[in-house]
Amino acid sequence: MRKYNTAELRESNYRHHYHPFTDHGDMRRKGARIITRADNVYIYDSDGNRYLDMMAGLWCVNIGYGRTELAEAARNQMEQLPYYNSFFQTAQLPAVELAEVLSEVTPPQFNRVFFGCSGSDGNDTVLRLVRYFWELQGRPERNIVIGRHNSYHGSTMAGASLGGMKGMHAQGGLPIPDIVHIDQPYYYMEGGEMDEQEFGLQRARCLEEKILELGADRVAAFIAEPVQGAGGVIIPPDSYWPEINRICRQYDVLLCVDEVICGFGRTGEWFGSDTFRIDADVMTLAKGLSAGYQPVGAVMIADRIAEILDDKAQEFAHGYTYSGHPVACAVALRNIRILREEKIIENARDHVMDYFHEKVLSLQAHPLVGEARAKGFLAALELVKNKSTRERYGSDGSTGVYCRDACLEKGLIMRAVGDTMVMSPPLVITREQVDEFHGLALDVLDHTLKGVGP
Ligand code: PXG
């Protein structure tokens, strides 16, 4: 195995690399983890430590690490045509083919795609597209987009504004104008004594109330993740999405579904829209689209929107140098071919999903876990001081950080969202690896309980 000088790498990294979502003082004290290689569901650091990656990178490596076919696809495309753009009536083969394949695998109303490089720029496209849709019909005042508190739609100005993260809004003057937020369907922490399905309906009806308050003729669209990921794997009650569908249709508000995390198998079906029967007009894709092997994103456009865009035959003044990048598209295509040919999503759903749920839910018996919940290959553990009152240890998220650090010590990757531990393992995880996770998680929870006190 190759040897690295971790101390030197850390020092250089600290001096020269400004990281996303990182406390640099803390990083200087503890030193960055330097990841050097990965295989299947495991990643390895520069000291040779192995970790079971229950986050699939950052919710994206759905087919697991080390698929050499994707490297071949990238290499072949780089040799054939490393770059050409898709502006000004030009196309190249991988983009043409990927657009067709995405029309096949996404729900039937989606037959048109706008390519980008990430989920964040995809949601910028969504914001401009939905406003443009109403402008084209002579309704420019219909420009307000409704999002939700504690949702995540990316880090660009539009992405962070559409998202409902308070900490992000506090920096840089966000949200930008004409974006508003409603409450989230977070039953465990916000449902109180209410019946869960009642709560789901109530939170969906916050959308109706907001539309009526603003006036439907001012509202362009509503945007939401099927399951909130970065917000803490918040799984809405079953009553939530059918009511959202109804409200959007009734007031003719475009429904934008952000499938950046939920797309490509994460919820046990191809899309969160399949799992929750979401009747969307616009769909944002990234992450699992290329399984993280290339930066690529896509915005799916429903026929009813495409018809207006075609009919008015104007130019959408929007695009990125790398929209439809041939190498990124070639890799995404190969990824989707693997998902289809090996039936990775169906196999995960039929052979591992229930077992994963059983093992995750069993952790609720642990004294530190107030609730364990799972949907598809997304799961969360709520760490609380008092199970019956749902009281936290504190509001600073330090129990989550303690638990996350304990995970790293034991060779496990889970992410802490405040005091909620979240997971999103590669879909290729086996039952044996789920057992490995379960053993490590119990160990980590015991250790954390000792550390933070009963
Ligand atoms: N939408 C959703 C639902 C996401 O989860 C984005 C958009 C933005 O995608 P890009 O590719 O621009 O990052 C995301 C990204 C976390 C974490 O801490 C989550 C994301 C990104 C970084 C960190 O859980 N999700």
Image (spheres, helix red, strand yellow):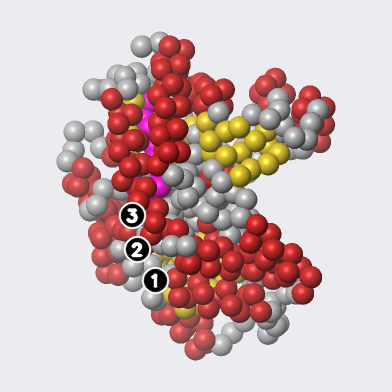
Bin the neighbour count of mark 1 within 10 Å (Cα to Cα): few under 14, some 14-19, many 20 and up: many
> Disc 2 to disc 1, how far (Cα)?
7 Å
Tell me which numbered mark, 3 or 1, is placed earlier along the sequence.
1
Tell me which numbered mark, 3 or 2, is placed earlier along the sequence.
2
Labels 2 & 1 near each other (Cβ < 8 A) = yes
- Looking at the rendering, which quadrant does residue 124 occupy? bottom right
Q: Is residue 223 left or right of residue 409?
A: left
Q: Which mark is residue 343?
A: none
Which residues lie in the magenta part?
374-384
- Considering the image in quadrants, where does the C terminus appear? top left
Labels 3 & 2 near each other (Cβ < 8 A) = no
> Where is residue 162 drawn, in percent x and y?
50, 53
- Residue toward you, 291 or 111: 291
- Residue toward you, 440 or 167: 440
Q: Is residue 264 left or right of residue 237?
A: right
Q: Main secondary structure of the magenta part?
A: strand
